Image: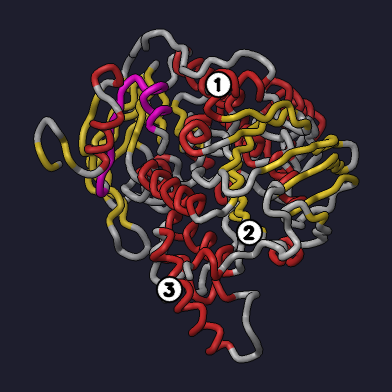
């Protein structure tokens, strides 16, 4: 008997020919915001079904209803043709549904094994549960290419391996239906490719998979069917083979969307920031930057490519005043920056450096604070926000936030809503709007479109190009090679804390960049 057969969770009364999932007339409102409006959808057994839509379209809300995080105001759920009441996640798990969230639900200081067993123990004694789980984990890992050390502590694992743990948790609980919410948002291209192989293996074993993603390339590559949502409604469901990225983008946004970056050749000016011999050593004594030399020039977007963990994050954080350097120098407009622990991000902002961090939750927002407060954080002491030397002008702050909401199409359009109540893509737009609208000389931007929908990606790219065309310098860090190639005027690749190569976008491609990301320069041999 295969692991898939052992872990099957289909209800006994299910009809063999019935859809794995059927949603009928699902509606859900949060106060005045109608997140889902009379949605009906069928997902066939043993298929990968994509769901796409703009940020705030209601995709995650709909799946949260299916998984029991929310209860629909009205509508019906059928699993395998059987009407099923899902009041909470325990009901969903009993119905054979598992969910891998965009932000992983793992206990960071627990081992892989402990996380998998947590909440699914067989009794008061933990030892038998762990022994059983270890055996089944080994079988699951082998069958689905989900190999991970069961004794590894979660915080020591790369995000790709943490995602494997989330999938293993669902399979251990006998999930026959797997929901993945933006699963590649934090993965490198190689990790995303491995995830797709895992999903294809699960489909071959008869599992049903729902994939929520903004990335149309992924939809076209991996799904059988795709449903499109817009403003809380289901606008279309089509066979993936019968559609195209352009058609899906138009269905999502309600207008034609340019799927490439439209920009004129750069008018490159003087060097604004000069980086020489920059070194950073982290708290564990590991050298993250090993002598970086870079020039950021006015009117140019310098793209930085690389597999996560090769120094890009350290580069952004030291230039943004978040971490200290252990060596080297940086000048901005000819003035030396303080690279010691005494520097801070506020000082960098005063010097004309804006920073869109890679991790918006950790460094970009205070999740419990309102949108208008987050909209001016770090810039709240600027004259336009002050009534006097001692009092801030809250009305001015709120008016400014409303202008940014309208310009950047932040949804829901409420400056009083807490940041935590916005979707990930709309949270990103709050951060982008705050930093771009500060009119910096240099913009440091990490993963600008992570978790952002296709229409907003087009808008954010245009804003970054507009900043460049105003004579600003932009340092762009992204794991999306399409984004690096489309936005950048010049590209450097980082490997093991060093620059492994520099290319012009017109003279390279993803294959060559991929080799440089592995430390191999095709023009010179090993970097």
* Pointer 1 with pointer 3, Cβ within 8 A: no
Is residue 452 magenta-colored?
Answer: no
Question: Can residue 318 be seen by looking at this rendering?
Answer: no
Instruction: Give the foreground label among 2 and 3.
Output: 2
Looking at the rendering, the stretch of residues picked out in magenta corresponds to 481-496
Q: Which residue is mark 3?
A: 150
Could you tell me which secondary element the residue under label 2 belongs to?
strand
Q: x, y (%) of residue 8?
A: 60, 65
Query: Along the polypeptide, which appears first: circle 2 or circle 3?
Result: 2
As drawn, the residue found furthest toward the bottom would be: 125
- Left or right placement of residue 116 versus residue 479 in this view: right
The residue wearing badge 2 is 98
Residue beneath label 1, please?
458
Between residue 474 and residue 221, name the one nearer to us. 221
**Residue at screen point 29% across, 60% down:** 286
Disc 1 and disc 3: Cα gap in Å?
Answer: 41 Å
Measure how far apart labels 1 and 2 are at the Cα level: 33 Å
Q: Is residue 153 above or below residue 377?
A: below
Q: Secondary structure at mark 3?
A: loop
């Amino acid at each position: 008997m295969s692991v898939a057969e052992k872990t099957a969770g289909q209800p006994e009364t299910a009809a063999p020919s019935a859809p794995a999932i059927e949603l009928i007339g699902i509606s859900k409102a949060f106060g005045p915001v109608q997140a889902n409006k009379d949605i009906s959808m069928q997902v066939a057994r043993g298929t990968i079904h994509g769901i796409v839509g703009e940020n705030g379209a209601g995709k995650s809300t709909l799946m949260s209803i299916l998984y029991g995080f929310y209860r629909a105001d009205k509508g019906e759920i059928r699993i395998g043709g059987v009407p099923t009441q899902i009041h909470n996640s325990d009901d969903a798990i009993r119905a054979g549904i598992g969910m891998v969230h965009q932000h992983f639900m793992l206990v960071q200081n627990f081992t892989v094994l402990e996380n998998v067993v947590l909440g699914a123990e067989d009794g008061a004694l933990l030892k038998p549960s762990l022994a059983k789980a270890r055996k089944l984990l080994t079988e699951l890992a082998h069958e689905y290419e989900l190999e991970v050390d069961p004794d590894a502590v979660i915080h020591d694992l790369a995000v790709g391996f943490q995602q494997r743990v989330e999938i293993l948790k669902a399979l251990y609980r006998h999930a026959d239906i797997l929901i993945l919410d933006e699963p590649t948002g934090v993965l490198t291209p190689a990790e995303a490719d491995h995830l797709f192989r895992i999903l294809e293996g699960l489909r071959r074993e008869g599992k049903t998979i729902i994939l929520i993603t903004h990335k149309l390339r992924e939809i076209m590559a991996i799904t059988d069917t795709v449903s499109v949502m817009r403003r809380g409604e289901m606008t279309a469901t089509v066979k993936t083979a019968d559609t195209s990225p352009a058609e899906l983008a138009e269905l999502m946004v309600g207008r034609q969307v340019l799927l490439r970056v439209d920009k004129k050749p750069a008018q490159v000016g003087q060097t604004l920031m000069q980086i020489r011999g920059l070194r950073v050593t982290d708290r564990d004594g590991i050298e993250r930057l090993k002598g970086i030399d870079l020039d950021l020039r006015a009117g140019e977007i310098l793209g930085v490519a690389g597999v996560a963990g090769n120094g890009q994050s350290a580069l952004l954080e030291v230039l943004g005043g978040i971490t200290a350097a252990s060596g080297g120098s940086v000048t901005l407009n000819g003035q030396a920056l303080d690279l010691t622990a005494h520097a801070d991000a506020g000082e960098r902002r005063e010097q004309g450096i804006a920073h869109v961090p890679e991790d918006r939750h950790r460094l970009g927002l205070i999740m419990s604070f309102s949108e208008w407060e987050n909209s001016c954080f770090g810039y709240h002491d600027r004259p336009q926000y002050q009534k006097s030397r001692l009092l801030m002008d809250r009305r001015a702050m709120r008016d400014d936030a409303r202008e940014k909401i309208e310009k950047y199409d932040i949804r829901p359009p409420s400056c009083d809503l807490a940041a935590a109540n916005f979707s990930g893509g709309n949270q990103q737009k709050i951060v982008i709007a705050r930093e771009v609208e500060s009119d910096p000389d240099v913009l440091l931007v990490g993963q600008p479109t992570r978790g952002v929908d296709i229409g907003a990606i087009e808008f954010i790219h245009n804003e970054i190009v507009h900043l460049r065309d105003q004579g600003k310098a932009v340092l762009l860090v992204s794991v999306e090679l399409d984004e690096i190639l489309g936005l950048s005027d010049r590209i450097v690749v980082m490997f093991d804390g060093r620059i492994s190569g520099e290319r012009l976008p017109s003279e390279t491609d993803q294959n060559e960049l991929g080799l440089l990301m592995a430390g191999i320069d095709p023009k010179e041999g090993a970097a």
